[in-house]
Image (spheres, rainbow, N blue to C red):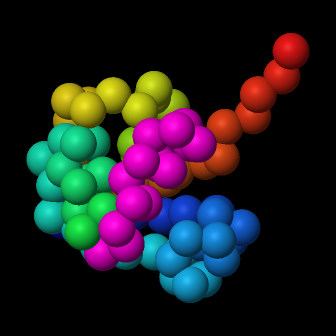
């Protein structure tokens, strides 16, 4: 199991304010699919709008990034600039 965590603003917008979830996944694709199963369409928003930190290390939202058992997967809204 992995713990998925969202910022409060993202949670208000997409999960009815719930910020933390426990999901069964071996990689980031599994996390995205699990969250999409709970909230249809959320997986696409996560891919497009967030950066992810797995156990405190930042990663691009890559499908095959491993998620070890007990990991914390934190989705952070992307900051874009020009």
Q: Is residue 50 above or below residue 59?
A: below
Q: Is residue 21 above or below residue 46?
A: below
Q: State the image coordinates of residue 73 (x, y, percent, origin top left).
A: 40, 52
At 55% across and 63% down in the image, what residue appears?
6
Give the residue drawn at x 30%, y 52%: 32
Tell me what residue is drawn at x 37 percent, y 72 percent. 39
The percent position of residue 43, horizontal first and vertical second, equals 37, 53
Q: Residue at x 51, y 31 (%)?
A: 58
Extreme-right residue of the structure: 82
Left or right: 69 in relation to 50: left
* Location of residue 16 (image quadrant): bottom right
Number of numbered discs overlaid on the protein picture: 0
Residue 35 in view: no
> Which segment did they paint magenta?
38-52
Q: Is residue 53 left or right of residue 8?
A: left
The quadrant in which the N terminus is found is bottom left
Q: Main secondary structure of the magenta part?
A: helix
Residue 49 colored in magenta in the image:
yes
Q: Position of residue 53 (x, y in %)?
A: 48, 41
């Amino acid at each position: 199991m992995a713990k998925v965590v969202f910022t409060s603003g993202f949670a208000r917008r997409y999960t009815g304010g719930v910020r933390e979830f426990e999901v069964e996944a071996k990689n980031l694709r599994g996390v995205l699919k699990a969250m999409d199963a709970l909230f249809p369409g959320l997986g696409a928003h996560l891919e497009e709008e967030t950066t992810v930190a797995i156990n405190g290390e930042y990663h691009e939202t890559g499908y095959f990034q491993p998620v070890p058992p007990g990991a914390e997967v934190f989705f952070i809204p992307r900051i874009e600039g020009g």
